[in-house]
Image: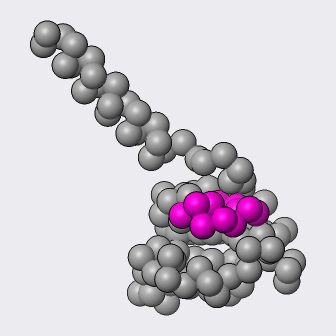
Amino acid sequence: MGILINVILIGAVAFFLYKRLVPAKGIRNISTSELNTELKNKEKQFIDVRTPSEFKANHIKEFKNIPLYDLTKKASELSKDKEVFLICQSGMRSSNASKVLKKMGFKNITNVKGGMSAWR
């Protein structure tokens, strides 16, 4: 009986980690060097999901700051018809933001891998 419980617990933890770390289907991931070429396109939306203080300290001028904790409230400010590029400090919050927008019906979502830590 104890072995069965351990197997179930390990399976639950593995599933939880898988869901947290694997990008959602339909979300594109790009490097910061690929982002550089995208920044020229005015038809795309660039959102930085870091806190206002992180954004103020260092940001890419084309990006608008909508912190992850405000994203569901402020998603109506974004167009579902335009591609949305998301960035944070390391790529984890923007990956979570990608999943939030996907659930809200956004179709063209791109996450910047490595975030501002990888931006040069």
Res 75 visible? yes
Question: In the visual, does 67 lie left or right of 8?
Answer: right
Residue 19: percent from left, percent from top: 47, 42
Above or below for 22 versus 14: below
Residue 75: percent from left, percent from top: 59, 80
Above or below for 78 versus 1: below
**Figure label count:** 0
Query: Camera-side residue: 72 or 68?
Result: 72
Residue 65 lies in what quarter of the image? bottom right
Query: Camera-side residue: 30 or 100?
Result: 100
Furthest toward the left, the residue is: 2
Question: In the visual, does 3 lie left or right of 23?
Answer: left
Q: Which residues are magenta?
A: 100-112
Residue 104: percent from left, percent from top: 60, 67
Residue 37 lies in what quarter of the image? bottom right
Res 32 visible? no
